[in-house]
DNA sequence: TGTATTTGTCACAAAGTTGTGTCCGAATTC
DNA sequence: GAATTCGGACACAACTTTGTGACAAATACA
């Protein structure tokens, strides 16, 4: 359901969290120090970060500065109230005190995830339906096979529908910053999308700039 | 047009940036170290911060944590890719590599300002609507196709509505500083705008000077 | 390992944009 | 009202940008 990064150096606790969050359907990645956490945050998108204050390498406080947009739940030892407050001030969504009731943690995780859920689970225009949960697309009821890149690109267009998106911006959204793509890379993928979905009239070219998905919302 | 803080310790570069942003109509403040940048950000509102990574006092990375809402464009030396990535993760909107093309900087500044425009994302007069996000224009509900230059020109007129704009100023705003435009260039584009939008009565000629878009705001 | 799929790149064709010159009427000045 | 300057109209060629199909490199898959 959600992708969660657990940054906690005590293995049994890390495992405990992972096991229980798995049980309720989340996908978890474990790291055991601050540097690994930062690296992981840079490499992939996470819906939530569970972060111990006392970490080897960069401390939790240093890590949170680089969580940039990812909501954070702090885990602190029971006698470090000042740390807790500091964590919240630095932008944590919540904190939890060790030793903790695992059910309480799960509860808080769900609260935070609910608060941060922004993307709808599906979006339709004309006879095309995009389902973000299953990552499937159908046109006129019939499923259309999209490659991962194509789906990502479509997703970027849907999320930013009715905005003119430059190739640079698309590269940043779908590929990632630093990708040294050929000038025609974005174009080619846009053509493929148009072809597979037959949406030449919706996915328009913005001359000299990029592309725009034109839909009347809904 | 916009209020921009330049935090760059190398005087010639700082001046270069300031001079060029002034030319296209922005108000610039210069600081030369990280502490001054933070102080300045606390004292006044800025629409954009141009921030060198390597600053005396607090580094750019420390400053950005305190930019709090102000969009940031990072300036890094050319061999510091990891810095660039780190900057983006920390919340910079964009980065630019030294030594840079000044026109490229101006371009990126405008892109970021547009993205963060707090002023309306659209503007209407009579039956004409200009949408800056999607870069579309409609007249009486029907979309009108404008070329990039035409749209940029219209944008300049809308942003500076009711001001008499000289051809030189328009060249600086829409083309860029240094463009060696022929006498008829601006005129021709104004004619095309008038024709496509049927706004001869709004987009008036200021004899011997240039043009002015006359609207009663709205 | 071999096969299929996906993804990035290239070269060329097609399409669209834009600056410039010229001509002519309109506005301004004296 | 004549002389002069200025802006409007328009055509067009140079130029830039985008579309297309083929292909090669990378990746996943069995």
Image: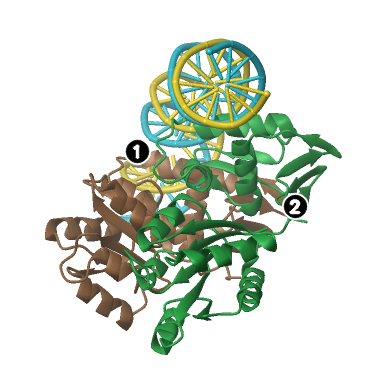
Chain colours: A green, B brown, C cyan, D yellow
Comparing marks 1 and 2, which lies closer to the viewer?
2
Q: Residues within 10 Å of mark 2 (few under 14, many from 20)?
A: some
Can residue B101 be spotted in the picture? Answer: yes
B43 lies left or right of B35: right
Can residue A161 be spotted in the picture? Answer: no
Residue toward you, A110 or C5? A110
| Rendered residue at 49%/47% (across/down) | A169
Q: Which quarter of the figure has residue A63? A: bottom left
Residue toward you, B177 or B99? B99
Q: Distance between the residues labelled 1 and 2?
A: 49 Å
Task: Give the residue at mark 2.
Answer: A123
| Rendered residue at 40%/83% (across/down) | A83
Residue toward you, B32 or A5? A5
Count all numbered tags in the image, as a single digit.
Answer: 2
Name the mark on residue B90.
none
Name the image quarter holding the C terminus of chain A.
bottom right
Q: Which quarter of the figure has residue C29? A: bottom left
**Residue B99, image x and y in percent?**
21, 46
**Residue A124, image x and y in percent?**
78, 49
Q: What element carries label 1?
A: loop
Q: What is the chain letter for disc 1? A: B
Q: Which quarter of the figure has residue D14? A: top left
D9 relative to A108, above or below: above
Circles 1, 2 touching at the beta carbon (< 8 Å): no
Name the mark on residue B182.
1
| Rendered residue at 14%/59% (across/down) | B10
**Residue A158, image x and y in percent?**
66, 50
Name the image quarter holding the N terminus of chain A.
bottom right
A5 lies left or right of B168: right
Q: Is mark 2 on a helix, strand or loop?
A: strand
**The residue positioned farthest toward the left in the image shown:** B11
Q: What is the chain letter for disc 2? A: A
């Amino acid at each position: 359901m959600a992708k969660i990064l657990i940054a906690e150096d005590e293995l049994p606790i890390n495992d405990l969290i992972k096991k229980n969050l798995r049980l309720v359907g989340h996908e978890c990645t474990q790291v055991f120090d601050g540097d690994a956490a930062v690296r992981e945050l840079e490499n992939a998108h996470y819906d939530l970060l569970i972060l111990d204050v006392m970490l080897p390498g960069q401390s939790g406080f240093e890590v949170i500065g680089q969580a940039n947009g990812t909501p954070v739940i702090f885990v602190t030892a029971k006698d470090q109230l000042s740390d807790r407050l500091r964590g919240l001030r630095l932008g944590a969504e919540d904190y939890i005190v060790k030793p903790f009731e695992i059910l309480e943690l799960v509860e808080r995780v769900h609260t935070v995830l609910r608060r941060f859920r922004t993307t709808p689970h599906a979006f339709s225009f004309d006879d095309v339906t995009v389902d973000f949960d299953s990552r499937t697309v159908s046109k006129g009821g019939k499923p259309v096979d999209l490659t991962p890149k194509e789906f990502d690109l479509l997703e970027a267009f849907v999320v930013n529908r009715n905005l003119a998106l430059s190739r640079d911006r698309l590269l940043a959204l779908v590929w990632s910053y630093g990708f040294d793509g050929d000038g025609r890379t974005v174009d080619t993928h846009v053509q493929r999308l148009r072809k597979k979905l037959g949406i030449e009239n919706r996915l328009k070219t913005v001359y000299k700039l990029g592309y725009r998905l034109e839909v009347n919302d809904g």
